[in-house]
Amino acid sequence: MALTPEEWQAIRLSLDVAARSVLVSLAPAILVAWLLTRRRFPGRFLLDALVHLPLVVPPVVVGWVLLMLFGVRGPIGAPLHEWFGIRLVFTTEGAALATAVMSFPLIVRAVRLGLEQVDPGLEAAARTLGAGPVDRFLTVTLPLMSPGILAGAVTAFAAGLGEFGAVITFASNIPGETQTLPLAIYSATQTPGGEGMAARLALISFTLAMGGLLLAELIARRMHPWLGRG
């Protein structure tokens, strides 16, 4: 199956955007998952609902909110553009941001599942031995919840490869800049004679997504015995 340079470009851009989205959202997702699992505080349920909101609202709405916030005239985008020369709207970085917001709940959910498997008694034992909060997290909690982190990252990467609505609304459909696989498939379906290109890209998209999901499951299964919980 020979691919055109434009098709390869869409594939490379999709992989780049999905990878960037995971890098952007992984650390905040771990922090939020830890707060929701280990802490009780006012507004916890509101934070939980806000985190999972991208799963239930239309992706176009998420893209529109990002456009209002991070556009060159938005309350966040305007200072970024004027003070630092950073423009996110209609850029690859903007596509990664939109993808990160959409996949963020997936990482949080996976990390929470991993964290719930960690015995709080181990953290308490480390505390009695003199380990501070940071030491306990880095040496006890983080290694034990690593299956959830890895599974969440891979799942978010696979989901990011298929993000469409938020990306096209916030970053548009610019070949070589923001045209990821789903957007390239959409463009092909709107082009006379583009059925072959759409079919090839759809098959590649399906293969990448399925591979990502299988990899996430494999990581989780391999890590559990290694951590002594299998």
Image: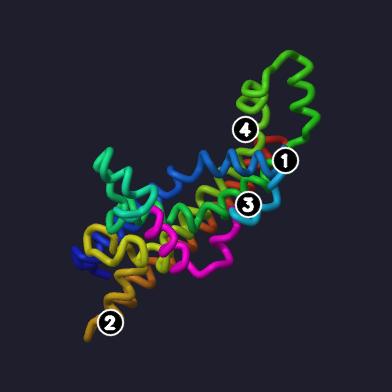
Circle 1 crowding by C-alpha within 10 Å: few under 14, some 14–19, many from 20 = few
Q: Is residue 60 above or below residue 156?
A: below
Q: Is residue 154 visible?
A: yes
User: Amino acid type of disc 1?
Assistant: Phe
Q: Is residue 168 above or below residue 113?
A: below
Q: Is residue 197 above or below residue 79?
A: below
Q: Which residue is mark 2?
A: 190
> Farthest residue in the left direction?
5
Q: Nearer the viewer, residue 41 or 25?
A: 41
CA–CA distance between discs 4 and 1? 22 Å
Q: Earlier in the sequence, mark 4 or mark 3?
A: 3
Q: Earlier in the sequence, mark 2 or mark 1?
A: 1
Front position among marks 2 and 1: 1
Q: Which residue is mark 4?
A: 142
Q: Which residue is mark 3?
A: 109
Look at the image and say whether residue 121 sits in the magenta stretch. Answer: no
User: Amino acid type of disc 2?
Assistant: Gln
Q: Which quarter of the figure has residue 6?
A: bottom left
Circle 3 crowding by C-alpha within 10 Å: few under 14, some 14–19, many from 20 = many
Q: Residue at x 53, y 41 (%)?
A: 28
SS type, badge 2: loop
Circle 4 crowding by C-alpha within 10 Å: few under 14, some 14–19, many from 20 = some
The span shown in magenta is 51-69
**Quadrant assignment for the C terminus:** top right
Front position among marks 4 and 3: 3
Look at the image and say whether residue 65 sits in the magenta stretch. Answer: yes
User: Amino acid type of disc 4?
Assistant: Leu
CA–CA distance between discs 4 and 2? 47 Å
